[in-house]
Amino acid sequence: MTRQFALPITVFVFSLLALPLLLSALWVKVVTSAVIFSLAAAGISVLFAQLGLINLAQVALIGLGGWVALRLNYGTAIPFTVIVFMAGTTTALIGAILALPALRMRGLYLALVTLMAAGAFQILFNAFQFPNGGSGFWGVAQQSAAEIRLPLLANSDVAYLRYTIVIVALCFCLVAMHRITAPGRAWAMIRQSEANAMAAGVNVTFYKIWAFVLSGFMAGVAGGLLSGALGQLDARSFLAADGILLFALAVVGGVYSWLGALIAGLLFKLLPAVFNNIGLSADLAMVLFGAALLHAIITAPRGIAGQLLVAFSRKSP
Amino acid sequence: MICIDNLSVNYGGVVALNSLTLNITEDVVGLIGPNGAGKTTMTNAFSGFAPIASGKIVIDDMNLLELPAYKRARWGLARSFQKVQIVNDLRVQDHLLAVIDAKGIDRKKRVWWIDKVLDFVGIADCRDTLGAELNSYRKRMTEIAKCLIGNPKVILLDEPGGGLSESEMQHLRSIISNTKTVFGAQIIMVDHDIDLIRDVCESTAVLDFGKLIAFGPTSEVLQDEAVKVAYLGR
Ligand SMILES: Nc1ncnc2c1ncn2[C@@H]1O[C@H](COP(=O)(O)OP(=O)(O)OP(=O)(O)O)[C@@H](O)[C@H]1O
Ligand SMILES: [Mg+2]
């Protein structure tokens, strides 16, 4: 039992205390984004690992959460942390709507539906942009973005990274709690077969929707955190294609553990930046991702995290 | 008392159950018939997984078919499947907890129920074993244990004896025979093993091509000429 917690706690404490001190100003920002995308990847993993459902709209949902957060940030005096929570719940509700097709279809067909939803969001983001302090409901002005409020304790980049790490860790705990309690058991029964679950009395519809709600919540919180990290959001950051990439990287990282989601976020945001930094094209990262995906599908169904965790459990007595 | 009234199930052009009428009062009833006769279809009709064309299933004045499938478990219907439904990465205990959650059983009684059903089926030692690590007998026992949680009214067992050894069969017999006394549930059991049916079922119904061709005390039914022709091939 204790060993199970050793790795996550070590990673948490290290990244909270030491990591921000080791990074230069530029990398603090990149790592903050990477951790935020890990949270969204964890949502993808819940759906895929627990129910085998493919959600390609997660990046679009991050954008939605970001939009809600900016809207509330400019339009109200609600504290930042509450705004992040509200962005999460709003997105969770939209996630529940995405769940409706999932009640009838799965596999490729569901993937296509979520992809089309992501495409629709991409068009909406392009048409309406993100609030930047302008007037009216859409809040867009032809000006550079106005300042947004940040959490009181997180007014520097380093402090905001720490703030992000704490919130993301809390959300990871939320997922872990789900896995070991009633929803996790219900999802396991559904994964075996829906008839099996219903025969045991599991309300299949409710628990499928609940998985989308949880996943959408995490995308929304990620969007809220991202709005604070960047100060303004750009419609070009939430393309439908990025939703496919994040899904692929969640599989590469490993959908069965928090570590896999973390790896997915790092691959998604950190690796291209590292390549840029050492003078390689960021497109090279794509080639690498493609190879890694093949590797994951063919030889490592539990992803990089699965391989690391096996190595870790062999080493420790 | 279980009253199946004029129940028909069609899969496209296939009539899987043809106006089945059957009143069951006995504690353990067998359901036999050749492959494709409609036995699994009948259990699926109880569970809400079969396309009902007409008819009713009334148990204790309640028409089961009016309930959504998942609510039937909470009402008191339990079943096992012809193909065992054990989740590989879930411990035995968690299989039982899933049923306990779904039936809304008081948290304080959880451990009591888990102890009770695992003791009854005799696999108390595998409480923490993962589904993947169970042998086929223990998988079957886990399925039966799941069925017993929360004192159901009716338990449907679809070929519980499939692939068990002789000594394991002996154990299964005693479990099925004691269920009514310990848990109060009526059992409808589908099986191809005539010895098992003869030993534990007071009455037996025989299906052929979706039609009921015989029903009555097991020993009489097994002597019935029509049954011998349809089923025993003699
Ligand atoms: N889901 C389904 N879709 C279409 N046809 C079905 C379906 N399930 C059963 N059938 C058909 O209904 C008939 C009865 O099948 P059922 O599975 O009830 O037989 P059974 O008595 O359980 O046979 P067995 O002893 O082989 O288990 C068969 O003709 C079968 O092909
Ligand atoms: Mg069958």
Image (spheres, rainbow, N blue to C red):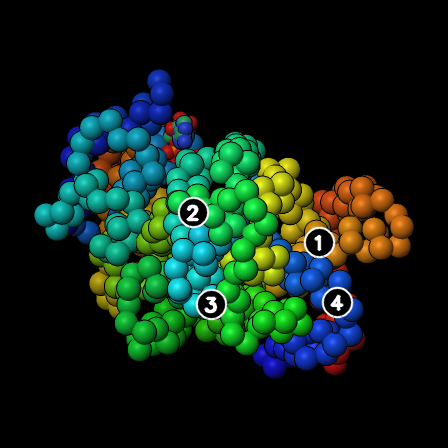
The alpha-carbon separation of the residues under discs 4 and 1 comes to: 16 Å
Q: Chain of mark 2?
A: A
Q: Is residue A20 above or below residue A99?
A: below
Mark 1 falls within which chain?
A
Label 1 sits on what residue type? Lys
Of badges 3 and 2, the one in the foreground is 2
Number of the front mark, 3 or 1? 3
**Tag 2 or tag 3, which sits nearer the N-term?**
3
Q: Are marks 4 and 3 on the same chain?
A: yes
Tell me the CA gap for discs 3 and 1: 23 Å
In this view, the mark in front (4 or 3): 4
Question: Is label 4's Cβ within 8 Å of ligand 1?
Answer: no
Sooner in the amino-acid sequence: mark 2 or mark 4: 4
| Residue at image mark 3 | A81
CA separation in Å, label 3 and label 2: 23 Å
Circle 2 — which element? loop
Mark 4 sits on what residue? A25
Comes first in the chain, label 3 or label 1: 3
Rendered view: A110 above or below B169: above
**SS under mark 1:** helix
Q: Residue at x 17, y 36 (%)?
A: B56
Q: CA distance from mark 1 to mark 2?
A: 32 Å
Please name the residue that numbered disc 1 is placed on. A269
B201 sits left or right of A273 in the view:
left
